[in-house]
Amino acid sequence: MIDLTTIWALIIAFAVLMYVVMDGFDLGIGILFPWFDEGAERDQAMNAIAPVWDGNETWLVLGGGGLLAAFPLAYAIILPATYPLITAMMLGLVFRGVAFEFRWRDPRHRAFWDMAFFAGSLVAALAQGVTLGALLQGIHVEGRAYAGGWLDWLSPYSLLTGAGVVAGYALLGACWLAIKVEGSAEDKAFRFAKLAAFGTLALMAAVSLATPFLAHQYFQRWFTEPMIFWLAPVPLVTAAFAVALLRALHKRQPVRPFLYALGLFLLGMIGLGVSMWPWVVPQSISIWDAAAPERSQVFMLIGVGLIMPLILGYTGWAYWVFRGKVGTHGYH
């Protein structure tokens, strides 16, 4: 049965997915940035995301703000459990944004700002991945409050998910550049995409194998009847997307690798949703336990119903206007 709380859970999941997909590829470009030559290659990489990078982060605000508004108890538990990670992520995003602007306005120190762009992107991506792992492995809750320590989030599993997100973002970034840039930068984009694809697939497999053994709930969800029959298509479809991605990269097709990479992320999100449902804080707090009062949810749903179409509209318009290849001096 779909109720108001379930609708809000789906809204936040959609916002998170949109952020991961849309900010993921420009963080990925930052992660790959040092391996492009100074000058035309780096300028093309920057221009490929210049019109959209700040708008992409709208979804982070919607996801985080929606969690606070719709599931305040979950927000009050998850944030204290991951404060070091959230702080690192925000600092990385801020430093990255500053570097993005200053590399154009301060040519004398462009090498420094280029490395700052890389470092901010890497830190933000790694922090997001480790946060995901920390959430999946469980948060120590007592009396509806976080009761763990300062470094409970740090574990081999959370570092594994962190590495997986970094590799996945690099894959998205390389596939996006394969669409947008030309010349030697395009050649490097395809080469980096192949390397990132193998890394992403290996880490996805490792995380997928490790997750069911984190908690009895996860194992039951994936390996007991009848769910095992319903969920069997997920890894099979993932394998099909992986083969299609590698084949498209081998043939140097410009658009399909990015679409296949998006498909892998979508399947990964579906797998995480299957594992976690209906917990917003796994094994501790369900979405109904954490939900805001019904009147608050209704009031906020009206606002989201008005705002989300606008966000989707201006995002689609921006991508349409700035479609096509980009050179060092602009689009053509």
Image (tube, rainbow, N blue to C red):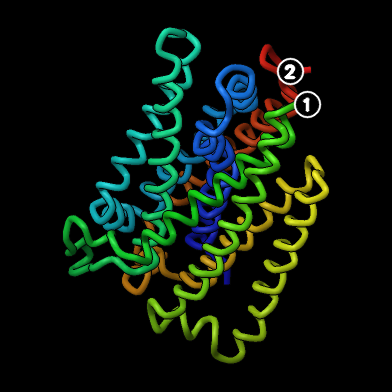
Amino acid identity at mark 2: Tyr
Cβ atoms under marks 1 and 2 closer than 8 Å:
yes
Q: Is residue 295 visible?
A: no
What secondary structure is found at the residue carrying circle 1?
A: loop
Residue 229 in picture, x, y percent from top left: 66, 86
Residue 324 marker: 1
Amino acid identity at mark 1: Gly
Residue at 54%, 34% (x, y): give it: 35
Residue 177 in picture, x, y percent from top left: 67, 34
Figure check: 119 above or below 329: below
Figure check: 327 above or below 1: above
Q: Quadrant of the N terminus?
A: bottom right
Along the horizontal axis of the image, is 122 left or right of 33?
Answer: left
Residue 106 in picture, x, y percent from top left: 43, 8
Residue 274 marker: none
Badge 1 or badge 2: first in the primary sequence = 1
